[in-house]
Image (cartoon, helix red, strand yellow):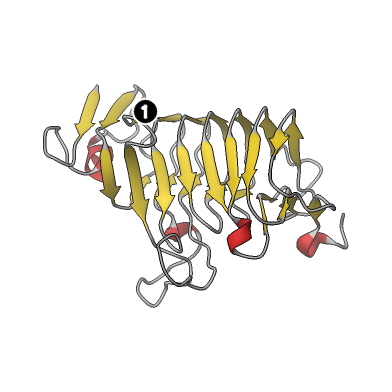
Amino acid sequence: MTYIVDLNGSGQYKTIQEAINAVPDNNNKWYKILIKRGLYREKVKIPPTKPFILMEGEGSRQTTIEWSDYASNGHMTTNFNTETSATFTLQADNFVAKYITFKNGYNLGEGQKQPMAQALAAVVDGDKASFYSCGFVGVQDTLFDGNGRHYYRDCYIEGAMDFIFGFAKTVFERCHLHSTAGDWGGGYLTAQGRGSDSDTGGYVFKYCIVTGTGLTYLGRAWGSHARVVFYKSQFSVSIAPAGWNAWNQKDSV
């Protein structure tokens, strides 16, 4: 089954969330949501009851989902926190996305910078999720690679502070990480949250490239047993000589 989303009205739906809502709860067959080119200004959420969804755009430069919430924006929305700031939230298992950019526009506009705040482009919490030729754009906490087993290939991920963080068991293959730390006086590529020796989580960056400006750490330890591996990857950004930062785990690492 394929649902077509088009801002101009040529599909069954004009918003992505409408198409997701149309997928039957607890389905066990794949549903494809084809998203025509355009800038979709909406927050999108796939709840746990909507597994087996394939979302496909017409190119990461042509199909973009964007919103601009941030974690300290609670005076506008009740029960607001880091995760609820996300433009896109995945909670369901068995998910695939292709050729889409997920963007949080907070602090990305022209003019004076706003205070640094968590502003997520995406939360990925479902198990067995994969992304192909997708973009993730933000400043702080761009991609919350939360829980589950995930795979990213040929993706573009941009941010300045902890812009890939979480607890998942994940491989990033042939991805392009772009640091904008130079705009903020320094930054961190990752903040991995593995908390024990028995925790199977961790991030592997395989055949990736890292570009950008400003002094950048490979990561800082969000958890006491944080695990991040860069394998046969290339760096053309200034990496801090220490490489890694223990952050709040100095007594345990």
Badge 1 crowding class, 10 Å Cα cut-off, few under 14, some 14 to 19, many 20 or more, is some
Foreground: 177 or 34? 177
Along the line of sight, the residue nearer the viewer: 48 or 157? 157
Q: Mark 1 is on which residue type? A: Leu
How many marks on residues?
1
User: Visible in this render: residue 157?
Assistant: yes
Residue 69 at x, y percent in the picture: 40, 63
Q: Classify 169 as above or below 220.
A: above
x and y, in percent, of residue 122 in the image: 46, 48
SS type, badge 1: strand
Residue drawn at x 69%, y 34% as measured from the top left: 204
Q: Is residue 60 left or right of residue 157?
A: left
| Mark 1 lies on residue | 54
Q: Residue furthest left?
A: 9
The image quadrant that residue 78 belongs to is bottom left
Residue at 36 percent of width and 71 percent of height: 77
| Picture coordinates of residue 208, whole percent (x, y) | 65, 32
Q: Quadrant of the N terminus?
A: top left
Q: Residue at x 63, y 55 (%)?
A: 162
Residue 149, picture quadrant: top right
Residue 148 seen in the figure:
no
Left or right of 239, for residue 175: left
Left or right of residue 159: residue 135: left
Residue 131 horizontal/vertical position (percent): 48, 31
- At 78% from the left and 47% from the top, the residue drawn is 196
Quadrant assignment for the C terminus: bottom right
